[in-house]
Image (cartoon, helix red, strand yellow):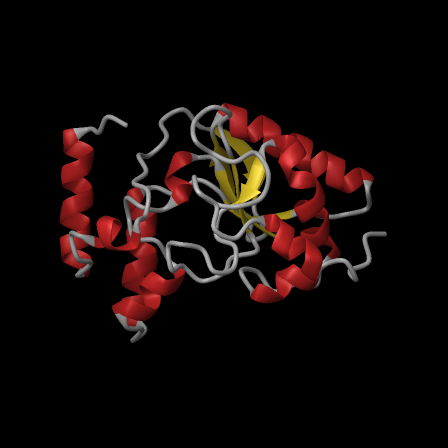
Amino acid sequence: MGTDEPYDARVAQILAELGVPASYGVDRNMPYFVEAKDLVSVGVDIYGRDRHLTPHAAGRWTELRGAAQQDGIALLLVSAFRSLEYQRQIFERKIRAGESLERILNVNAPPGYSEHHTGRAVDLTTAGCMPLAEEFEMTAAFAWLVRHAHRFGFAMTYPRENRFGVAYEPWHWAVRAAGAGWPQRGGEHEEGVGDSSREAERTRGVDLR
């Protein structure tokens, strides 16, 4: 993928200011993401903030949410597109709160490496579930996603035991572009160490209504 020098310079400067090693991407085998420019609103998230995705991802999200609603499943949006600056603020807020950089990097990708920059990723929850919590995997909403999200081009990016060393995120799903090296069902980036079939086994007892 070609890169934009001014963008790369911004990323490098932000990483340096946050104390993230310049070798982070290589060390973690993490993909590098460029901010999407063409974005459309997909409505507000659970906190009332207007959220955006690329036009294609927005269409797929609308289809996914509608299909879930027809099956009695409520998919609620927690997060979507995030800029470099937004991701930087997440790190700065946690650092001010006393969290170590190592701990933060286990649960948050630094600026330049967040899939949310692409405008194709969403964080989801459902009624009665704490946002961005592993307990989401025990909900009917998660079980529905495991079985049906691939029909709409979505896959879970960070399953258990993912090769990036990132904490398990059952709430984080992203639209994969056909022919662009992304799996079309389950799994994670490219090689897909731990795909959604494992999560399907874990959710067989969840009530799908």
| Along the line of sight, the residue nearer the viewer: 24 or 39 | 24
Q: Residue at x 65, y 39 (%)?
A: 149
| Quarter of the N terminus within the rendering | top left
Picture coordinates of residue 80, whole percent (x, y)? 48, 42
| Along the line of sight, the residue nearer the viewer: 139 or 193 | 193
Q: Is residue 2 above or below residue 99?
A: above
Picture coordinates of residue 45, whole percent (x, y)? 56, 47
Q: Residue at x 56, y 34 (%)?
A: 184
Picture coordinates of residue 51, whole percent (x, y)? 50, 40
Q: Residue at x 32, y 73 (%)?
A: 97
In the picture, measured across the screen, residue 160 lies left or right of residue 139, that is: left
What is the total number of numbered labels drawn onto the structure image?
0
State whether residue 126 appears in this view: no
State whether residue 75 appears in this view: yes
Q: Residue furthest bottom?
A: 98
Q: Residue at x 28, y 52 (%)?
A: 88
Q: Is residue 103 above or below residue 4?
A: below
Picture coordinates of residue 65, whole percent (x, y)? 68, 38
Q: Residue furthest right?
A: 209
| Along the line of sight, the residue nearer the viewer: 187 or 126 | 187
In the picture, measured across the screen, residue 64 lies left or right of residue 180, that is: right
In the picture, measured across the screen, residue 18 lies left or right of residue 1, that is: left
